[in-house]
Amino acid sequence: MAVENEVTSRTVDGVELPAVGTYTLDVAHTQVGFAVRHMAVSKVRGRFTSFDGTLQVAEDPTQSALKVTIDATSIDTRDETRNNHLKSNDFFDVENHPTWTYVSTGIAVAGKGKWKVTGDLTIRGITKPVTLDASLEGVVKDPYGNHRVGFSATAEINRDDFEVSFGAVMEAGGLVVAKKVTIEIEAEAVYQA
């Protein structure tokens, strides 16, 4: 469905920014995932297939706001046995905490097209501040008349902070699953109003 209005991007300090308004994540073109070191020799990546989010773009970009809700039961690591283990109390405890949230609390310019998005991340009912290093990837009007914004973001968290404390140790020492987890986001959001 085309958006029949004259939404336009704008340029602030030499950076093309999306128009002021509300944008929703396009789930089909967004990936919310993570990477974690496994057995100290490789990284395992996972993603969530069910989530939603809203970006409220303000006239002053630093006054913008982001809210994302993730269905933790939708974990996909391309291995059903591992997915089920991650859903258990050893990791995500989805029976008691099926939903995670991230709500921004502040946005600061970190360079041309770069931002530091601070916010509260809630996993397993525990809320901790997490800062995303975000990059604006572009603003475009698609062939159907929809206005889109693309961005990428990363952050590092310690899973122990959220009581995701599975602690199996290898025979030679070291954890089977590292404590440091890298959050990786590639997103498209579509203008609503």
Image (cartoon, grey):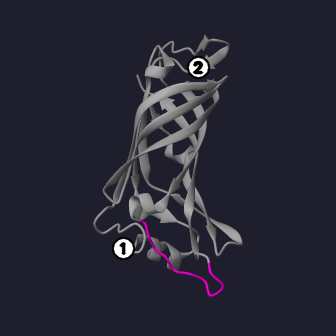
Residue closest to the eye, 84 or 126 = 126
Identity of the amino acid at label 2?
A: Leu
| Alpha-carbon span between mark 1 and mark 2 | 42 Å
Residue drawn at 46 percent across, 13 percent down = 59
Location of residue 123 (image quadrant): bottom left
Callout 1 secondary element: loop
Circle 1 residue? 89
At horizontal 44% and vertical 18% (from top left) the residue drawn is 58
Q: Name the residue under label 2.
A: 17
As drawn, the residue found furthest toward the left would be 96
Identify the main secondary structure in magenta: loop
The outermost residue toward the right is 41
- State the residue at coordinates (65%, 28%): 138
- The magenta segment: 164-173
Counting the numbered discs, the total is 2
Graded by Cα atoms within 10 Å as few (under 14), some (14 to 19) or many (20 or more), the crowding at tag 1 reads some
SS of the residue under disc 2: strand
Is 169 colored magenta in this rendering? yes
Residue 109, visible in the rendered structure: yes
Question: Which is nearer the N-term, disc 1 or disc 2?
Answer: 2
Relative to 10, is 186 above or below? below
Q: Nearer the viewer, residue 193 or 134?
A: 134
Which residue is most to the bottom? Answer: 171
Q: Where is residue 72 in the image (x, y as percent from the top left)?
A: 41, 60
- The x and y percentages for residue 35 are 60, 60
- Residue 95 lies left or right of residue 193; in this view the side is left
Does 44 lie within the magenta span? no
Single out the mark in the foreground, 1 or 2.
1
Q: Residues within 10 Å of mark 2 (few under 14, many from 20)?
A: many
| Res 139 seen here | no
Residue 173 in the image, given as x and y percentages of width and height: 62, 81
